Amino acid sequence: MKKELIAAREPKSPISELFRTLRTNIQFMNTKTGLKSLLVTSTSPSEGKSWVSSNLATTFAQAGKRVILVDCDMRKGRLFSVFSVPPAPGLSNYLSGVNSNGESGDTRIESYIRKTEVENLYLITAGSVPPNPSELLVSEKMAETMQELEKMCDIVIYDGTPTNLVTDALIISRNVDSTIIVCAYKYTKIDDLERVKRDILNVGGKIAGVVINKMPIAQKEYYASYYYGSSSTSVSTSHKKSSRNKVDFAARIKPETQENSRLYNIDDSKNSEEDD
């Protein structure tokens, strides 16, 4: 388990508090329909998508939920390194029916689910790099697998691909209850974010909001955020004349990283533009 899985290594840290806030907000957004599956995607690489998905999955597991985290990035999946497990066999091997040695693989999805060091958290790695990742994800077997996984646990979290590069995440977004988009402060282009939002909605997906990662924060503000040894989390809601509703959930994290992350509801894409 790498240091980046901070929700497990340092559960009392401000970063862990941030992810617990994110978990709670996502749950509140799906109280009527219930939340059984969630996709985490981004616009481009290096925005922190896998970091968010792995730590978010950890906080769900810490809340007593039985969680299966699935790495759907069959091209450059990295969750195996986060949890220090072998990369294969994984999702691609199960869907293709071929193991890492080129032989017929196990036909039971249970054989590809790995226990992690985090209690209640299980992992399906991306597996061997296949020549046709998109075809595997759009297959009927993948749709059946997603339904089967939901029956086996309380929530399934899918770590998708960057949406601007390939369409893999769009394929998954059609069959999950909700999607969150991870972007990076002063790195993600607003046009890219609007395009990803539009593409997900066009295929019938639902979007919970946007997590803005790598936001700078003054060290003095960081220390001011502590209260009896824990971090403070600010929640503010603003209603505008156009009836748009933007909810901003902000939490402070380590001064040495000088970052801050937020979750925005993007009922209107202009919300993100105003805060860019």
Image (cartoon, rainbow, N blue to C red):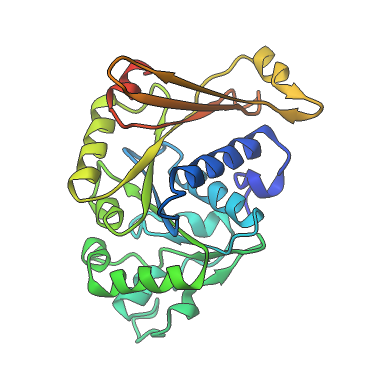
**Would you place residue 258 above or below residue 263 in this image?**
above
Q: Position of residue 100 (x, y in %)?
A: 40, 76
Residue 257: x percent and y percent?
60, 27
Instruction: Tell whether 242 sits left or right of 90.
Output: left
- Depth check, front residue: 159 or 4: 159
Image quarter of residue 276? top left
Q: Residue at left 22%, top 44%?
A: 201
Residue 29 location, x and y as percent? 44, 43
Q: Can you tell which quarter of the image residue 158 is in? A: bottom left
- The residue under the point 31% across, 46% down is 206
Task: Decide: is 61 above or below 274.
Answer: below
* Image coords of residue 25 (percent x, y): 51, 40
Rendered image quadrant of residue 10: top right
Q: Nearer the viewer, residue 259 or 33?
A: 33
Q: Quadrant of the N terminus?
A: bottom right
Q: Residue furthest left?
A: 202
Residue pictured at 37% horizontal, 70% vertical: 147
Figure label count: 0
Pick out the residue farthest to the right: 228
